[in-house]
Image (cartoon, helix red, strand yellow):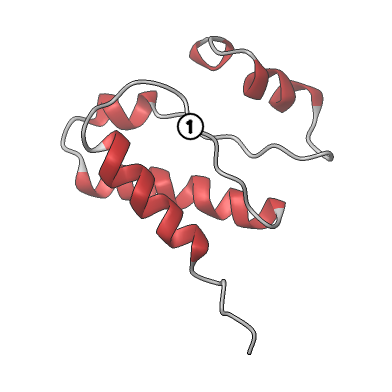
């Protein structure tokens, strides 16, 4: 029987939010997705979840999420690789 994997993005966002963002932990995390569309959906959901549940919007503004794929453009690739570039 084939497993339903459609909820993995929602579960990933839940884990990231509850265990990292909501506890105001600093650092980097990487999450892999099956498709670029899934990762874009995850980044959007993470931002929405943060804005809905955190009163201190600075925490949400400082949370950076980017999808990485072989099709990504040069600017996004630099943002994904350089740990400080997104701050500019």
Tell me: 86 left or right of 13: right
In the rendered image, the quadrant that contains the N terminus is bottom right
- 49 sits to left or right of 78: left
Q: Say if 7 sits above or below 13 in the image.
A: below
Q: Which one is nearer the viewer's eye here, 2 or 28?
A: 2
Q: Could you say which is closer to the camera, residue 29 or residue 68?
A: 29
User: Farthest residue toward the bottom?
Assistant: 1
Residue shown at 40% from the left, 21% from the top: 27
Name the image quarter holding residue 25.
top left
Farthest-out residue, front: 1
Residue 20 image-quadrant placement: top left
| Residue pointed to by mark 1 | 29
The kind of secondary structure element at disc 1 is loop
Q: Name the residue at 70% across, 37% down.
A: 68
Left or right, 35 with respect to 65, comes to right
Residue 51 lies in quadrant: top left
Q: How many marks?
A: 1
Please, is residue 44 above or below residue 76 in the view? below
Compared across the picture, whether 58 is left or right of 27 comes to left
Q: Nearer the viewer, residue 46 or 13?
A: 13
Q: Residues within 10 Å of mark 1 (few under 14, many from 20)?
A: few
Q: Position of residue 84 (x, y in %)?
A: 53, 9
Q: Residue at x 32, y 50 (%)?
A: 49
Residue 4 at x, y percent in the picture: 56, 79
Q: Position of residue 69 (x, y in %)?
A: 76, 40
Residue farthest toward the left in the current orientation of the protein: 55
Q: Residue at x 55, y 43 (%)?
A: 31
């Amino acid at each position: 029987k084939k497993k339903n994997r459609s909820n993995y993005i929602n579960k990933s966002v839940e884990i990231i939010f509850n265990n990292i963002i909501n506890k105001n932990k600093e650092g980097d995390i990487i999450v892999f997705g099956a498709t670029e569309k899934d990762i874009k959906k995850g980044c959007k959901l993470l931002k929405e979840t943060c804005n809905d549940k955190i009163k201190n919007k600075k925490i949400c503004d400082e949370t950076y999420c980017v999808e990485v794929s072989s099709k990504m453009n040069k600017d996004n690739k630099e943002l994904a690789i350089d740990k400080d570039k997104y701050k500019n």
